[in-house]
């Protein structure tokens, strides 16, 4: 009897131990599943500005990494991205200042066990409307974080040129001078060329508020932090923000984040275009995007070829711009890119010259008009829309051309007119321009709070020449 009881007791003890062992296995399994996604790391061996040189880390370009640093005795992380290779070294560009890093510090690569690839997801979806985000999709507006379900991978697909729908419909921008004299088509790419301080931001705000579009995507690249806040609160306003997505990468963030902000904003516009929406994309500015590309490229050792810009910059800009426009079976992306010019006397800097050649038109802002208090300070003489003749009536096109001729004739003889040296009857076109000059000036000017739709703009143009 004792033997039987002893045997039963041993059996129960073995079952108990086996059960405890299973529980331990389950416990360790949970621990393993909770382990960090870091699966490999290298060592930092060199720093050149924001460029980091790492050995022992093999990762594809575009991989997201974390670099350890010590501040106040605490181990913190710097975010960085793999941008190139140099023999046995992997080159990373930091998203943040490199204070606190030290020789030999560990550099970790983030890896996803679920997708078996490098993690680089961004939020895309209807939830983005009314939000202000950075280039990674992190909220800057103090509101709740975005739902993880709306995060997805970036797909930068090249559009077959034969699969692009032609531009046939007029885009109503709500600005009289643009609607009537530089008519924009839905799906067009336009450059706004301007030097500093002549009303560029105000014009962009008017375009964002008044343009007829389903979704507005605004990318503010390299702007001062104060300007970002002022543009959102005072120029764009709450009504404009409600149908917009703002991606901000101010001047104090890494050049790599400024580059990613431009790409992310374009990806958002592409997402809504695939949902058959008509999207307005505003990017301010394309020049600062080029400057950020220049800083990264020069850090990697590329040789400058024109005003400090390496050759890769002149291929990056067309790739970014060509992602917008019309596409078969989808909606459209009408894009406005601001281009900063050093001065009106020398507008043909490399970036300005490149953008003129690849965009579908350009709007030039004039400091002369701005100093006169003439807003929007659009120089009608030098501004042009390349698709305008194909989307408007012959009557409007003829009137717009004659309007420009009157403006050009008056401006070229402005000094003679002011000193009274011009003899009436010498030039019939100039005589007409002098006669109706106040009407022409009034037509070109528009208050920031004033909206002029396309039909009323054309009607006002027609009234001038009746």
Image: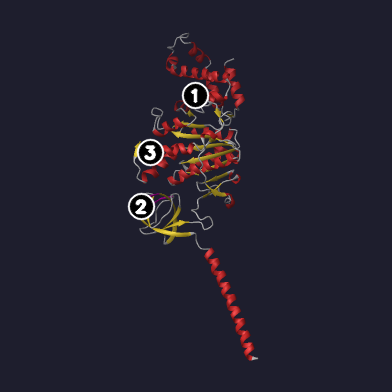
Image position, residue 218 (x, y; %): 53, 39
Residue 196: in sight, yes or no? no
Vertical placement of residue 427 versus 299, above or below: above
Local SS, label 2: strand
Residue furthest right as drawn: 1
Tag shown at residue 380? 1
Task: Tell me if label 2 and label 1 are in contact, CB under 8 Å.
Answer: no
Of the two numbered discs 3 and 1 in the rendering, the one whose residue sits closer to the viewer: 3
Local SS, label 3: loop
Is 47 placed left or right of 389 in the picture? left
Q: Which residue is denoted by mark 3 in the rendering? A: 311
Nearest to N terminus: mark 3 or mark 1 = 3
Q: Which residues are magenta?
A: 84-94
Residue at the image point whose x is 59% and y is 35% from the top: 213
Dividing the picture into quadrants, the one containing residue 41 is bottom left
Return the residue nearer the eye: 59 or 73: 59
Residue at the image point whose x is 56% and y is 72% from the top: 24
Image position, residue 76 (x, y; %): 44, 58
């Amino acid at each position: 009897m004792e033997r039987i009881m002893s045997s039963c007791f041993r059996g129960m003890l073995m079952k108990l131990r086996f059960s405890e062992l299973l529980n331990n296995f389950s416990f360790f399994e949970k621990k393993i599943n909770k382990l960090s996604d870091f699966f490999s790391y290298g060592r930092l061996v060199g720093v050149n500005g924001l460029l980091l040189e790492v050995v022992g880390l093999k990762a594809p370009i575009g991989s997201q990494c974390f670099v350890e640093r010590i501040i106040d005795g605490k181990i913190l992380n710097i975010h960085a991205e793999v941008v190139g290779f140099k023999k046995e070294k992997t080159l990373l560009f930091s998203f943040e200042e490199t204070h606190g890093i030290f020789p030999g510090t560990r550099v970790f690569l983030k890896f996803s066990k679920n997708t078996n690839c490098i993690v680089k997801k961004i939020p895309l979806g209807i939830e983005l409307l009314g939000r202000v985000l950075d280039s990674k999709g992190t909220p800057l507006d103090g509101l709740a974080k975005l739902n993880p379900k709306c995060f997805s991978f970036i797909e930068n697909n090249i559009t077959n040129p034969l699969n692009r729908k032609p531009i046939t419909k007029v885009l109503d921008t709500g600005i009289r001078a643009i609607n009537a004299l530089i008519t924009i088509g839905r799906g067009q790419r336009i450059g706004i060329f301007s030097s500093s301080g002549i009303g560029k931001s105000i014009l962009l705000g008017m375009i964002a508020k008044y343009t007829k579009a389903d979704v507005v995507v605004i990318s503010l690249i390299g702007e001062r932090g104060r300007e970002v806040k002022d543009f959102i609160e005072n120029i764009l306003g709450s009504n404009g923000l409600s149908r917009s997505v703002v991606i901000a990468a101010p001047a104090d963030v890494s050049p790599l984040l400024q580059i990613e902000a431009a790409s992310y904003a374009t990806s958002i516009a592409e997402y809504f275009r695939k949902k058959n929406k008509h999207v307005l994309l505003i990017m301010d500015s394309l020049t600062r995007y080029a400057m950020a590309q220049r800083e990264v490229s020069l850090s990697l050792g590329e040789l400058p070829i024109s005003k400090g810009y390496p050759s890769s910059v002149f291929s990056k800009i067309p790739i970014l711009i060509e992602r917008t426009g019309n596409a078969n079976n989808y909606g459209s992306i009408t894009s406005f890119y601001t281009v900063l010019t050093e001065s009106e006397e020398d507008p043909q800097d490399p970036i300005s010259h490149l953008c003129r050649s690849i965009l579908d038109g350009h709007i030039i802002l004039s400091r002369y008009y701005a100093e006169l208090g003439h807003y929007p300070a659009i120089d009608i003489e030098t501004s042009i829309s390349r698709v305008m003749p194909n989307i408007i009536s012959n009557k409007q096109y003829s009137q717009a051309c004659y309007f420009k001729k009157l403006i050009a004739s008056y401006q070229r003889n402005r000094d003679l007119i002011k000193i009274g040296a011009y003899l009436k009857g010498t030039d019939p076109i100039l005589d007409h321009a002098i006669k109706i000059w106040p009407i022409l000036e009034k037509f070109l000017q528009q208050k920031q709070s004033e909206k002029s739709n396309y039909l009323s703009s054309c009607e006002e143009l027609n009234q001038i020449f009746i």
